[in-house]
Image (cartoon, helix red, strand yellow):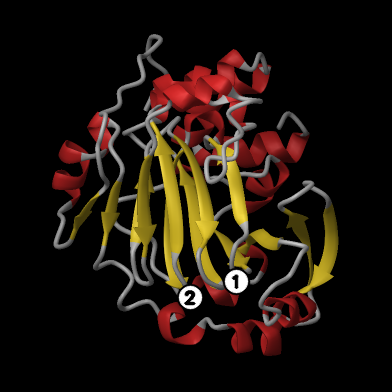
Amino acid sequence: MRQKNKCKLVWTSIDFVERCSHLSCDEFVDKYASVGKPVIITDVMQDWKAMKKWDLDFFKSHYGSIEHVVKNDKNEDRAFMTIADYIDYMSVENSDECLYLANWVVSYYPELLEDYKEPIYFSNWFQRLPRKLLQKYEYDNPEIFIGHKGTSVGLHKDPSSCAAWLGLISGRKKIIFFTPEQKDVLYEGKVDAFNPNLEKFPLYAKAKPVEVILEPGEIIYIPPNWWHQVKNLENSIGMGNLFVNESNSELVFQSFIEKGDIKAYLLPLILEFPLVSRFMLFIGIL
């Protein structure tokens, strides 16, 4: 593993997102990861304990007293709410608040890590690093998303050219995708792709969105730098993860370096030699 010369992002335009099962790792890399193409994998989550265990009652009874940030979709306001209070709020059918409990980091509750299996397609070099380091730089994954019907994660692309996967435990989600080259008509994600204001964002009329519905038990792969917006069609529980591996490492290294942080030049080294990262963290370099 080493940093290579400046690389070019590769993606494949699509008219729809394919669904696949019985996919080998080589097939995933050849057909999707290496060409920058989203895909839904339908047969990965069936043996997860979370599929039978994780429901609203489970989280309320076991983690109800924990406070977490919730986001208001309408005005981006953030506040703390206990898990129990948020789940009670989810029982309100027509709420005007549109509160979403997202990005709840699983590793703070290690027992939850036993309820899922990292999909074989998404090996994650970040997991070689100390948990404390990942938490410090907010790359500690996976994360849980518990969402009220109608709430949305705004239009965005994932940070630092990371790839991502999103698995759905319950409920249904609609996802709108845009290929990376459409960034100029997306206004840096200020557009609501589910209800675009063309008077305010006229260039969005040129966008070519691709919509897909994610069903329970399905995982969707999101390639680096694809713009996407996710909406909960029903009360839902999902789980997602950012990752870096051989399929996108050059892009990730390049992204960190472009941010101008001297620590970015250390990333290839510490991913290849994780013990070095522990020493650097200990002496305060990282």
Q: Nearer the viewer, residue 39 or 244?
A: 39
Q: Position of residue 125 (x, y in %)?
A: 44, 42
Please determine whether, in this image, residue 53 is positioned above or below residue 237.
below
Q: Quarter-wise, where is residue 152 in the image?
A: bottom right
**Label 2, label 1: how far apart the Cα atoms are:** 7 Å
Q: Amino acid at mark 1?
A: Pro
Give above or below for 83 relative to 271: below
- Residue in the image at 59% along x and 68% along y: 149
In the rendered structure, which amino acid carries the disc numbered 2?
Glu
Please tell me whether mark 2 sits on a helix, a strand or a loop.
Answer: loop
Q: Nearer the viewer, residue 198 or 56?
A: 198
Q: Residues within 10 Å of mark 1 (few under 14, many from 20)?
A: few
Kindly indicate the quadrant of the structure image that contains residue 174: bottom left
**Residue 15 seen in the figure:** yes
Q: Which class describes the residues within 10 Å of circle 2: few (<14), some (14-19), or many (20+)?
A: few
**What residue is disc 1 on?**
110
Q: Is residue 230 above or below residue 70?
A: above
Q: Residue at x 38, y 76 (%)?
A: 48
Q: Position of residue 4 (x, y in %)?
A: 38, 14
User: In the rendered view of the protein, which quadrant contains the N terminus?
Assistant: top left
Horizontal and vertical percent for residue 50? 46, 78
Question: On the rendered structure, is 22 left or right of 203?
Answer: left
Quarter in which the C terminus is drawn: top right
Please give the name of the residue rendered at 15% of the width and 54% of the height, measured from the top-left corner.
Answer: 24
- Tally of marks: 2
Residue 138 screen position, x and y as percent: 67, 44
Q: Are marks 2 and 1 in contact (CB under 8 Å)?
A: yes
The residue wearing badge 2 is 114
